[in-house]
């Protein structure tokens, strides 16, 4: 597999790609009364790998299809480079799309699937033959050229779909969950190879996924959507460490962020009913910028410190172990704090039994405070 991609990259470096940024300005797409994409503004600059991330039904695939020309936006503008493409057919946009299902033509052989974009572009038959054979050799699918898609494995279909997309030398790659049909081991391998490939050839790429690990490991920039609305755009680090709102904080990270409803008191503390958490003055002042004193405290499981209640330092929040979840390199503790169930991540050699009592504290520089009404981040 490694030699396949090394050779493929060398081939691609010899191609001349017309690089282009992709710009969406207030793009809206409706299906009846449902707003699938709601005033989406986003830019992918030249050579950038942008990931559209969100739960099923959030609008990410619809946005990608609008860029490709497979759906027409009801409002807004889409630019590829400096050209407005709203009224251009898909074939006129010079983009290549790889679908979740690979979208190979089932009645065509692998050769015809690879050749199809070139045939549409009226490339001479001799040149088509040369390019198809060259790509097939580099992808090690020469022996598959006479087969049809139903005779291929998932990994083979993925390679054919990728080869068909790149053989066109497009301005932009559009990828709709192209790895989701692969087994776990191959998916991890292809994730790294696709990222390396994109960096080597430097072509603008927009990649759709619901898998946060794919997004965090592959994207230069991540755009998180929910119910058609853009929630946050930023680098993986920005989104993880500085989420713009409660949805982003809860969606990114595994296990998800713990949330505690609370009230900001006059003495700079968060009263969460089951416990009171004191804030430094500067953080408390930032928390007061919300719409009211009602807040939500957010703490990631990785940012909770757990120590046994029998320890001499008896301070913090009282918790009782309810369940342990060993996952190899980590141990997840499900802790009862009054009515709350709190998840904390500790090392796998942490000794604990169900029913044990602990003190827990939060890393103060890692906590987040959200406006309870708007969900926006205050701290």
Image (cartoon, rainbow, N blue to C red):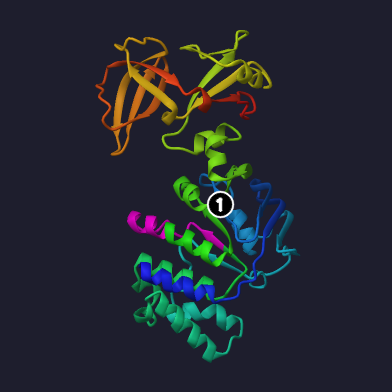
Name the residue beneath numbered marker 1: 220
Where is residue 61, by image quadrant? bottom right
Q: What residue is shown at x 54% (from left), y 77% (from top)?
A: 14
Q: Is residue 58 visible?
A: yes
Q: What residue is shown at x 67% (from left), y 51% (from top)?
A: 42
Q: Is residue 315 shown left or right of residue 259?
A: left
The residue stretch that appears in magenta: 174-191
Q: Is residue 271 shown left or right of residue 361?
A: right
Q: What residue is shown at x 41% (from left), y 76% (from top)?
A: 138
Where is residue 79, by image quadrant? bottom right
Image coords of residue 363 (percent x, y): 47, 24
Vertical relation: 67 (above or below) 296: below
Quarter containing the N terminus: bottom left
Q: Is residue 104 visible?
A: no
Is 361 in front, or is 87?
361
Disc tally is 1
Is 34 in front, or is 369?
369
Outermost residue on the front side: it is 312
Q: Is residue 184 magenta?
A: yes
Image coords of residue 207 (percent x, y): 54, 56
Is 248 in front, or is 73?
248
Image coords of residue 96 (percent x, y): 57, 68
Q: Is residue 47 shown left or right of residue 132?
A: right
Q: Is residue 33 magenta?
A: no
> Alpha-carbon neighbours of circle 1 within 10 Å: few (<14), some, or many (≥20)?
some
Vertical relation: 361 (above or below) 225: above
Q: Secondary structure at mark 1?
A: loop
Q: What residue is shown at x 37% (from left), y 66% (from top)?
A: 155
Quarter containing the C terminus: top right
């Amino acid at each position: 597999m490694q030699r396949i991609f090394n050779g493929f990259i060398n081939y691609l470096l010899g191609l001349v790609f017309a690089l282009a940024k992709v710009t969406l300005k207030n793009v809206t797409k409706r299906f009846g009364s449902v707003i699938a994409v709601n005033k989406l503004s986003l830019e992918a600059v030249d050579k950038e790998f942008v990931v559209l991330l969100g739960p099923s039904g959030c609008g990410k695939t619809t946005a990608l299809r609008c860029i490709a020309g497979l759906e027409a936006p009801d409002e807004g503008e889409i630019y590829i480079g400096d050209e407005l493409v709203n009224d251009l057919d898909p074939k006129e946009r010079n983009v290549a799309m790889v679908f979740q299902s690979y979208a190979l033509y089932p009645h065509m052989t692998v050769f015809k699937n690879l050749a199809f974009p070139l045939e549409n572009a009226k490339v001479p038959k001799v040149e088509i033959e040369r390019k198809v054979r060259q790509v097939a050799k580099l992808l090690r699918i020469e022996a598959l050229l006479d087969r049809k898609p139903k005779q291929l494995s998932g990994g083979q279909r993925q390679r054919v779909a990728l080869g068909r997309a790149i053989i066109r030398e497009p301005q932009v790659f559009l990828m709709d969950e192209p790895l989701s049909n692969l087994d776990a081991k191959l998916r991890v391998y292809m994730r790294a190879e696709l990222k390396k490939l994109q960096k080597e050839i430097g072509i603008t790429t927009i990649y759709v996924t619901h898998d946060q690990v794919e997004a965090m490991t592959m994207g230069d920039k991540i755009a998180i959507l929910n119910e058609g609305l853009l929630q946050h755009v930023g680098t993986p680090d920005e989104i993880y460490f500085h989420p713009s709102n409660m949805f982003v904080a809860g969606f990114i990270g595994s296990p998800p962020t713990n949330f505690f409803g609370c009230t900001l008191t006059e003495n700079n503390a968060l009263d969460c009913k089951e416990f009171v958490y004191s804030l430094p003055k500067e953080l408390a002042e930032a928390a007061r910028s919300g719409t009211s004193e009602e807040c939500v405290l957010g703490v990631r499981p990785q940012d909770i410190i757990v120590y046994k209640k029998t320890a001499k330092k008896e301070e913090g929040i009282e918790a009782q172990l309810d369940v342990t979840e060993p996952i190899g390199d980590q141990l997840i503790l499900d802790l009862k704090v009054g009515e709350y169930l709190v998840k904390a991540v500790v090392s796998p050699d942490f000794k604990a039994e169900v029913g044990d009592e602990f003190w827990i504290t939060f890393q103060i520089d890692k906590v987040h405070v959200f406006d309870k009404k708007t969900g926006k981040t205050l701290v």
